[in-house]
Image (spheres, rainbow, N blue to C red):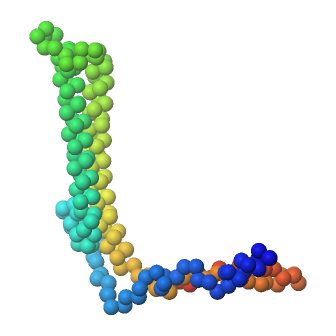
Amino acid sequence: MIKIIILILLTNTYLFSQNNLVESDTSKTLVKLNPKKAATLSAILPGLGQIYNKQYWKVPVIYGGYIIIGHYIKFNNGMYFEFKNALLMEVDGIESTINPFPNFSESLLERNMEFWRRNRDLLIIFSGVYYLLNIVDAHVFAHLNEFNINEDISMNIKPSLKQINNSNIVGISIKFNF
């Protein structure tokens, strides 16, 4: 009984059809974007390639990322110099200079100095990777802009009846239209 109800519900039913979800708009013509130009513009000034691709919303994201990375580079650099100066005050032998971190030994000051220096250097490398990702994003989107999707993409599910070895087998047939 359940099989019959499922077969009735699925008979000639379109589960997904792009024609139903997206209005057909043949009046718009795709503007071909030059991926090399988009990448070059993004390399000259980050975000310019995204503007060329008409992805204006990405520009604040790109510059927000640079602001955050720059803030943490500055913070890590300040902490590095703070521990470096404390280490210099600890080992200089002059009684008038006082270590701002009295509970830290010389080895602990040196470890903290190296920790903040390493974090600063990794963030500088990360900013370079972020710059390259900006260029790759502009280049890839310019390529994907000319990717044309046919409006006849659909999936059709129907009940099916097959005869295998002289026995009838009831099943479901899935048909994809590209």
Quarter the N terminus occupies? bottom right
Q: In which image quadrant can residue 131 be found? A: bottom left
Q: Is residue 26 above or below residue 4?
A: below
Residue under the image location 48 percent in, 84 percent down? 20
Q: Is residue 72 left or right of residue 93?
A: right
Furthest-top residue in view?
Answer: 95
Q: Is residue 147 above or below residue 133?
A: below
In front of the other: 80 or 160: 160
Q: Is residue 174 visible?
A: yes
Q: Is residue 166 left or right of residue 142?
A: right
- Badge count: 0
In front of the other: 11 or 38: 11
Picture coordinates of residue 88, whole percent (x, y): 18, 19
Q: In which image quadrant can residue 79 be found? A: top left
Q: Is residue 76 above or below residue 46?
A: above
Q: Is residue 16 above or below residue 71?
A: below
Residue under the image location 31 percent in, 68 percent down? 139
Residue under the image location 28 percent in, 63 percent down? 58
Picture coordinates of residue 45, whole percent (x, y): 18, 62
In front of the other: 157 or 108: 157
Furthest-right residue in view?
Answer: 166
Residue under the image location 28 percent in, 22 percent down? 110
Q: Is residue 40 visible?
A: no
Picture coordinates of residue 30, whole percent (x, y): 32, 84
Q: Is residue 164 left or right of residue 129?
A: right
Furthest-bottom residue in view?
Answer: 27
